[in-house]
Image (cartoon, grey):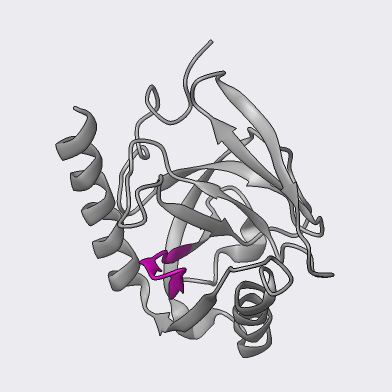
Amino acid sequence: MANLWEDMETGPDAPDVIYAVVECLKGERNKYEYDKDIPGVVLDRVLHSNVHYPSDYGFMPQTYYDDEDPFDVLVLVEDQTFPGCVIEARPVALMRMDDDGEQDDKVIAVPTEDPRYDHIEDLDDIPQQLQDEIDEFFSTYKNLEAGKEVETLGWEDKQAAKDAIVHAMELYEENFA
């Protein structure tokens, strides 16, 4: 069985087009995580707060970020996919975040194969209401977990997202190649 973190490329044309491996599903409270040792998706926990993922959420293959995990990506979708699904996507924004003192930024991306998102090219194309919902989710989803502190630190454009992806690819290369 292929290891979705180690055996796949970051994308067919990274950082412009990336692969997102879905772990958590839009509209759900289950926090799934890909376990590279199995390899497979396992239930990590159910979110303690009464919130749900605003869109499909996962990671980019062959990336490693400052929080010492694969780089996170939230893919804007109309309908949820499934844990382990691979979505070809275009990065359009970056949400800066601090999770318990560690840099834990999130790339926001759109599927390349969904024409409903063709018009979203950069941060300014994401409706403000959706930005607010995403920010609110990540600001509050750990509130009821003892000892967990999360702070969202604002939004940046597509270029910042691509720069962060390159950084995550370089960290992966340094640590695992």
Residue shown at the point (40%, 27%) measured from the top left:
8
**Side of 82 where 95 appears, left or right:** left
Residue shown at the point (36%, 71%) measured from the top left:
158
Q: Position of residue 142 (x, y in %)?
A: 66, 68
Residue shown at the point (69%, 80%) measured from the top left:
133
Look at the image and give the residue range highlighted in magenta.
Answer: 96-107
Which residue is nearer to you in this view: 38 or 12? 38
Outermost residue, bottom direction?
A: 128
Q: Position of residue 143 (x, y in %)?
A: 69, 75
**Side of 176 where 133 appears, left or right:** right
Which residue is nearer to you in this view: 142 or 73? 142
Snapshot quadrant of residue 162 = bottom left
Quarter of the image for the N terminus: give it: top right
Question: What is the magenta segment's predominant secondary structure?
Answer: strand
Residue 45 against residue 155 in the figure, above or below: above
Outermost residue, left direction?
A: 174
Snapshot quadrant of residue 159 = bottom left
Residue 142 against residue 38 in the figure, above or below: below
